[in-house]
Image (cartoon, grey):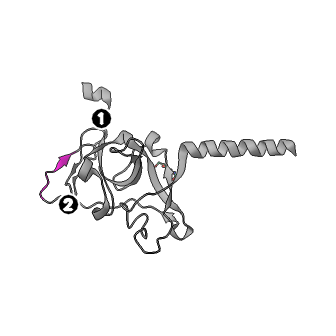
Amino acid sequence: MRKLLQRVGVSVALAVTVSDVFVSVMPVQGTSMQPTLNPDAHKPVPTPRDWVLVNKTVQRFSSVQRGDVVVMKSPTDPKGRMVKRVLGKEFDVVRPRAVGAHLVTLRAGHMWVEGDNADRTIDSNSFGPVSESMVQGRVECVVWPPSRWGRVRSQQLDSQRLVYANNRKKTKKSDRNN
Ligand SMILES: *[C@@H]1O[C@H](CO)[C@@H](O)[C@H](O)[C@H]1NC(C)=O
């Protein structure tokens, strides 16, 4: 019996460690991603805020795609993090939301992120492009509350906003130096 308990203990410890490396679950703050996340936060009787499953392997093994919802470090608050959708990646050209704004060409290793709720978001339209290294993971699904359970989809992007999508392979550092 004692051996069995020990074994169970070890597997639980392993499972926790593994899940911490590959995925994590966190609550979403605020209303900037409405209607995708926290859709009812403004109602008189708000539903509990959404908890999402975050895929942390994207940051290590593959890169994030345009249209994905990501969790990233906040560029304005060193301790904070934020959830936003990726509009453009390095070498893409994006049109900021402000009417008449100049087009922005994203530098190597940078991306443009926005909240889905244009009226309620502080994003690249205010703080500009952000480094890809700020990304902590991709939001895969809402896991809580149960009524909100479901995948968080990558979204087709407006070609008026993503003016040019650079689909060339990333240049290797060694190529750049030649
Ligand atoms: C995390 O992302 C990777 C790479 O896109 C994918 O292969 C994997 O299935 C994802 N994991 C989860 C739990 O969604």
> Is the CB–ligand 1 distance for label 1 below 8 Å?
no
Q: In x, y percent, where is residue 59? A: 44, 42
Estimate how packed mark 1 is, as few (under 14), some (14 to 19) or many (20 or more) residues with alpha carbons within 10 Å: few
Above/below status of 88 relative to 99:
above
> Quarter of the image containing the C terminus?
top left
* Left or right: 17 in relation to 58: right
Q: In x, y percent, where is residue 104? A: 19, 48
Residue at the disc numbered 2: 160
Q: Which residues are magenta?
A: 100-105
Residue at the disc numbered 1: 171
Of tags 2 and 1, which is closer to the observer?
A: 2
- Asked whether 90 falls inside the magenta stretch, the response is no
Upstream in sequence: badge 2 or badge 1: 2
Could you tell me which secondary element the residue under label 1 belongs to?
loop
Q: Residue at x 60, y 43 (%)?
A: 18
Above/below status of 104 relative to 31:
above
Q: Nearer the viewer, residue 14 or 90?
A: 14
Q: Residue at x 54, y 49 (%)?
A: 24
